[in-house]
């Protein structure tokens, strides 16, 4: 059970970038959400972002640090949101 929740939003691009602007944030789990109704986002690590997050969909990831999760968009610069617990 999480004692602390963190959340954030940032713009994406077609190049993978770490969540939280690359700033370390200790977590146990993260739910990455795609609030865009038309563009697919992709999540992964620094090398590969191949896990699709469909429009209005989400992906739960267990990790120890938010900045290990990289996200990119199929096109444009839609936002990505996240909610994490620790």
Image (spheres, grey):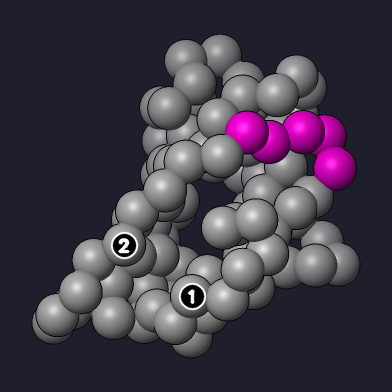
Q: Any magenta on residue 13?
A: yes
The C terminus sits in image quarter = bottom left
Q: Residue at x 77, y 22 (%)?
A: 75
Q: Which residue is mark 2?
A: 6
Helix, strand or loop at disc 2?
strand
The first of marks 2 and 1 along the sequence is 2
Q: Is residue 17 left or right of residue 57?
A: right
Residues drawn in magenta: 11-15
The crowding category of the residue bearing disc 2, from other C-alpha atoms within 10 Å (few below 14, some 14 to 19, many at least 20), is some
**Above or below, comparing residue 28 to residue 6 in the picture:** below
Cα distance, mark 2 to mark 1?
9 Å
The x, y position of residue 46, in whole percent, is: 80, 67
The x, y position of residue 29, in whole percent, is: 37, 73
Q: Nearer the viewer, residue 23 or 77?
A: 23
**Above or below, comparing residue 40 to residue 63 in the picture:** above
Per the rendering, the mark at residue 25 is 1
Report if residue 62 is visible in the image: yes
The x, y position of residue 67, in whole percent, is: 61, 69
**Above or below, comparing residue 65 to residue 71 in the picture:** below
């Amino acid at each position: 059970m999480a004692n602390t929740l963190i959340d954030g939003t940032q713009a994406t691009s077609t190049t993978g970038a770490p969540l939280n602007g690359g700033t370390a944030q200790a977590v146990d789990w993260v739910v990455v959400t795609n609030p865009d109704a038309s563009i697919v986002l992709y999540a992964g690590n620094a090398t590969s972002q191949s896990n699709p997050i469909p429009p209005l969909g989400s992906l739960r990831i267990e990790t120890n640090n938010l900045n290990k999760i990289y996200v990119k968009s199929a096109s444009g610069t839609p936002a990505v949101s996240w909610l994490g617990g620790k």
